Amino acid sequence: MQLPGTERINEAGHLEIGGCDSLLLAERFETPLYVLDETSIREAASRYIHSFEAEGLPFQVLYASKALCTMAVLQIVHDEGCQFDVVSAGEIYTALAAGIEPNALYFHGNNKTAKELRYAIDTHVGHIVIDNLDELTRLQEILRQRETTMRVLLRVTPGVEAHTHEYVQTGQEDSKFGLDLLSGQAMAAAQRANEDPHLILDGLHCHIGSQIFTLASFELAIEKMAAFAARLQTELGIQIPWLNVGGGFGIRYTEEDRPFTPEAYVHAICQATRHAFTSRHMPVPGVMIEPGRAIVGPAGTTLYRVGVRKEIPGIRTYIAVDGGMGDNIRPALYQARYEALLANRAAEVPQERVSIAGRYCESGDMLVYDAFLPKVHVGDLVAITNTGAYTYSMASNYNRVPRPAMVLVKEGQADLIIERERLESLIAFDRVPQRLRSLSAINAVAG
Ligand code: LLP
């Protein structure tokens, strides 16, 4: 199996991440544990940025915070030169708390509330990405009241949807996101934005999917966006300074995944943009991308302790670990596939097929089916790689299980960046009505 980032098997036969022995990490911080490799995050972010530098177009790399939004992660990515795609007041708040300048934030979302829009305006978020006409109305109203201006991009549904291994053109543009081209919503929004002195139309945005392994889907989307930009120019006299083509760059979860390099994705996007605009005799806009998974996915490894080995002869051997769908919902939700290894006996030859089950009360709580591992014993440490994206950020307290801690590792140093939740934190927001108080007092004493 191919180990991502700085991962290697050390002299003791243990998995080492960022120069830290995973057994020591598990002992010190307990399990389940998210381990995040700082070098891997920095390298991914800087490769996207350097790829653009080689292309010579104005550019911005926006990290899609939804993949993993913690103050430390945002600071690292910012340090590498990224700006940010944020989708809620919570993500804006986290970025501001991390010391990121509000101007570096692009506020996305298909239903931004008036409260969130006001918060974004009052905290001087740099751009709002307008998703639909109702939001535009809401934003115009607030800006009028506040007597202030806002830079905006328009999120357009280009009618291209990329699936994992192919792309399709969705004729009906059936999506909850964005302003669609066919019905004229995108054109109407552009006209309204152009006429409103409170709005500065800085460009267009599209996002065609996630974990994309085809360049053609990006190229087709860019072609459609350029055609729309040409209409804006001829019909409304609007020039588009920026084209944001969204995120979705694939990563290698298992050996079947064959992602392009950052250089290849960026080159294809820049080439397609140059071609689509110059062939229409239009100035080539600056290009933005919004990678999330590709920046943090490979940097994450989750460590779990094996608590149960259950053999059902002729059927399956279940290995139950101390985490699961609460810390990584992706296998249960999307049938996402991961690779696993035994972190404490990483150099041993695999000899059995086992299925790694979570600890949550649901049959679907399976992390990896049919992993090929050395003989697994109770007490072993299982590592699942490439878990940096959409795991912690989608974690829950299902079964009232506290969410795990996260440590950042680099060159042999390990620092806690998310504390493990405690039992008290689980009830921190519970409230008991007065008429039930006597009961809870009795229980509290009993507990
Ligand atoms: N930009 C926009 C507007 C997006 O909606 C997304 C992801 C991204 C950028 C970043 O996409 P990425 O580069 O990370 O693929 N929870 C799912 C993924 C949902 C993606 C939502 N939007 C998963 O675990 O696979």
Image (cartoon, grey):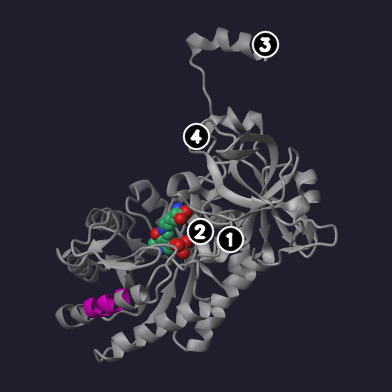
Marks 1,2: beta carbons within 8 A:
yes
Q: Label 4: how many residues lie within 10 Å, few (<14), some (14-19) or many (20+)?
A: few
Magenta residues span 221-229
x 52%, y 39%: residue: 365
Name the residue tied to disc 1. Answer: 74
Q: Nearer the viewer, residue 403 or 283?
A: 403
Circle 4 is placed at which residue position?
363
Question: For mark 3, does the 10 Å Cα neighbourhood hold few (<14), some (14 to 19), or many (20 or more) residues?
Answer: few
Q: Is residue 344 left or right of residue 4?
A: right
Q: Which residue is mark 2?
A: 65
Q: Which mark is residue 139?
A: none
Residue 422 percent across, percent down from the top left? 66, 33
Q: Residues within 10 Å of mark 1 (few under 14, many from 20)?
A: many
Q: Is residue 128 magenta?
A: no
Tell me the SS state at disc 4. Answer: loop
Alpha carbons under labels 4 and 2: distance apart: 31 Å
Q: Would residue 412 appear left or right of 417 to someone viewing this image?
A: right
Q: Is residue 220 left or right of residue 78?
A: left
C-alpha distance separating marks 1 and 2: 8 Å
Q: Position of residue 264 (x, y in %)?
A: 48, 80
- Type of amino acid under label 3: Ala
- Nearest to viewer (mark 1 / mark 4): 4
Q: Earlier in the sequence, mark 3 or mark 1?
A: 1
Can residue 46 be seen?
Answer: yes
* Residue 309 position by quadrant: top right
- The quarter of the rendering in which ligand 1 is drawn is bottom left
Q: Nearer the viewer, residue 60 or 183?
A: 183
Residue type at mark 2 is: Ser
